[in-house]
Amino acid sequence: MPVTRPGLVEMPDGEQIEVMLKPMPRGTPLGIELSDRLKDDYGPLRAMAEAGNAGAAMMLYDELERCREAFTTEASLNEALTRLKRDRVLIYRSANKKPQPIGQSSDPEQVAQSFLIKPAKRCAGTTDAQIAESPQWLERAAEGGDMRARLAWGQAKFGTPEAVTDFTQLWNEGNLYALQSLQMALLRLPDPATDYAYIYAYNLIELKLYEAAAATDRSRSYNFQLQVLGERSNYLQGFLNPQETTRANEIAAFLLRNNPNCCEGPW
């Protein structure tokens, strides 16, 4: 079972910063037994969500969003199954999502069961009006403190200063996942004078925290995250001159050193 443990972050200039690596808190079980169809679960979940249960609101949002892509008529499902088996292409209900070829090693029968047949059964009887409600349940879940909802709700505001504010607050609470979203929120601001020093700093913090986690838990591999973050760090550094890189390193150290809640993540 994951436990909170101390870690040591070493910054590029050699400064060492002590942090606490905290596992992300688990959601509280809803205490209800779900049926095979969302139409039977919709009422109880909605009642719990309206009563202020953020977990129920988030589950309702997730379920309704999955149903947004599910083929719920026999004709549309059969068309999707035909395309999958004939062309090895997975199509979606939404016109905004492009058809997706499946790999040669993928079993079309298993893909059909997981992505077409099972969702169709789960969503049978769910109405378009109910599906249209999904954003309000995401908002309620975010307002109720559900962490995934807060991240998703902030991402829905990309391109606005409010998104930066939301993710800054999440980072101040020690949430590792806010760092990636903070970078995207800054990149999508309309102001063309993007401050890459802060974007680089947020990525550097995340990289250094994964390095600290890898050093304190040899039983788990963080190689993929370290590779991706390292490559991104090299890419972002291309936007900075040496003086700006030094400033970015100082920003990262300051933010890490002065966050008493750091750091909740997948440790």
Image (cartoon, rainbow, N blue to C red):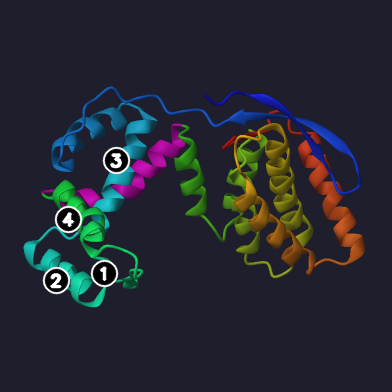
- Disc 1 marks which residue? 91
Q: What's the CA distance linking mark 2 and mark 4?
A: 12 Å
Of residue 93 and residue 166, the one placed in the foreground of this image is: 93
Q: Quick check: marks 1 and 3 in contact, CB under 8 Å?
A: no
Q: What residue span does the magenta drawing correspond to?
A: 125-144
The label shown at residue 60 is 3
Quarter location, residue 115: bottom left
* Dot placed on the residue nearer the N-terminal end, 3 or 2: 3
- Disc 2 marks which residue? 79
Image position of 118 with respect to 22: above or below:
below
* Dot placed on the residue nearer the N-terminal end, 4 or 3: 3
Q: What's the CA distance linking mark 1 and mark 4?
A: 13 Å
Q: What's the CA distance linking mark 4 and mark 3?
A: 20 Å
* Dot placed on the residue nearer the N-terminal end, 2 or 4: 2
15 to the left or right of 19: right
Q: Quick check: marks 1 and 2 in contact, CB under 8 Å?
A: yes
Q: What's the CA distance linking mark 1 and mark 2?
A: 9 Å
Let me know if residue 126 appears in the view: no
- Disc 4 marks which residue? 117
Q: Position of residue 183 (x, y in %)?
A: 65, 56
Image position of 183 with respect to 254: above or below:
below
Q: Look at label 4 and name its amino acid.
A: Ile
Question: Residue at 89% across / 55% down in the picture?
Answer: 246
Q: Secondary structure at mark 2?
A: helix
* Dot placed on the residue nearer the N-terminal end, 1 or 4: 1
Question: Residue at 39% across / 38% down in the picture?
Answer: 140
The label shown at residue 166 is none
Asked if residue 127 is among those painted magenta in the image, a careful observer would answer yes
Q: Secondary structure at mark 4?
A: helix
Q: Look at label 1 and name its amino acid.
A: Ile
